Image (cartoon, rainbow, N blue to C red):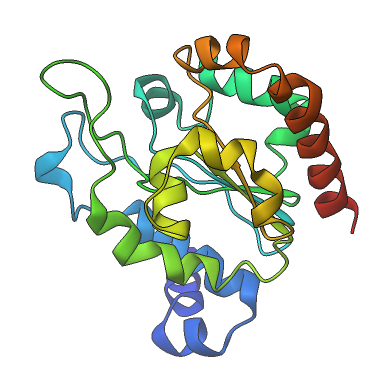
Amino acid sequence: MIQTQTKLDLCSTNSTQNGNVETRLNCLVQEIRQCAACAQKLPLGPRPVLHVSPNARLLIAGQAPGTRVHETGVSFNDASGDRLRGWLGMSRDVFYDSNRIAILPMALCYPGVLPKGGDRPPPPECASLWRERILALLPNIQLTLLVGAYAQNYVLGKGKVYERTEHFQDFLPQYFPLPHPSWRTGAWERKTPMFQEKIIPALRREVARALTG
């Protein structure tokens, strides 16, 4: 009873307005964990997945959890995550260190698949409800990786994913656009030698800069 009351006190309206950033962020994440705003749209029900800390210096903005991420509660815990970590040249230990790297997709729950295949778009309610409130409590972000069309279009407006990736330098030092690291990207990688020759080395330099300050 005392522990429950303590949690309620920590996340009272007064505390979340006047507490330190870490307390406010923890309370916001507790609120997000209970969100059911899109429940009627979600085939597997709500299970928000995000990894955040006010200390994080790199933000990875992706699309939405897939089925494996929904099952495990761990972002990019699938083949696309393996590909992304390969691009970054980064171990799982570093990738999942929330004190260094925040992972915040455009929708926090698995949205399901389209009738003809492929993931459904992230429900727009999610970003409108939570995204700016979360970002306001991530004061140390030095670089945001915009992974895939939905993240890029939300932040930069309508555009072409691969074209933006090839012209990544236009968005530095704040953003680094990337394609979604799915198997479908493999064909573009194979016919775009500059991705491995120029973009990947630049990506790793920018990530190192962001993480080390």
| Residue drawn at the location 34% of the way across and 58% of the way down | 127
Quarter holding residue 178: top right
Residue sitting at x 53%, y 66% = 135
Q: Residue at x 83, y 31 (%)?
A: 201
Q: Using residue 164 as the reference point, say whether residue 112 is left or right of it.
A: left
Percent from the top left, x then y, of residue 65? 39, 33
Q: Is residue 7 left or right of residue 144?
A: left
Spot occupied by residue 57 in the image (x, y as percentages of width and height): 74, 57
**Extreme-right residue of the structure:** 212
Quarter of the image where one finds residue 109: top left
Looking at the picture, how far across and down is residue 54, in whole percent? 67, 64
Residue at 25% x, 41% y is: 46
- Residue 7 horizontal side relative to residue 95, left or right: left
Q: Does residue 15 appear left or right of residue 32 in this picture?
A: right
Residue 72 spot, x, y in % from top left: 45, 25
Label tally: 0
Quadrant position of the C terminus in the picture: bottom right
* In the image, residue 78 above or below residue 34: above
The N terminus: image quadrant: bottom left
Camera-side residue: 202 or 54?
Answer: 202
Residue 181 lies, with reference to residue 6, above or below; the image says: above
Q: Is residue 78 visible?
A: no
Is residue 49 visible to the viewer in this orientation of the structure? yes
Q: Give above or below for 163 relative to 83.
A: below
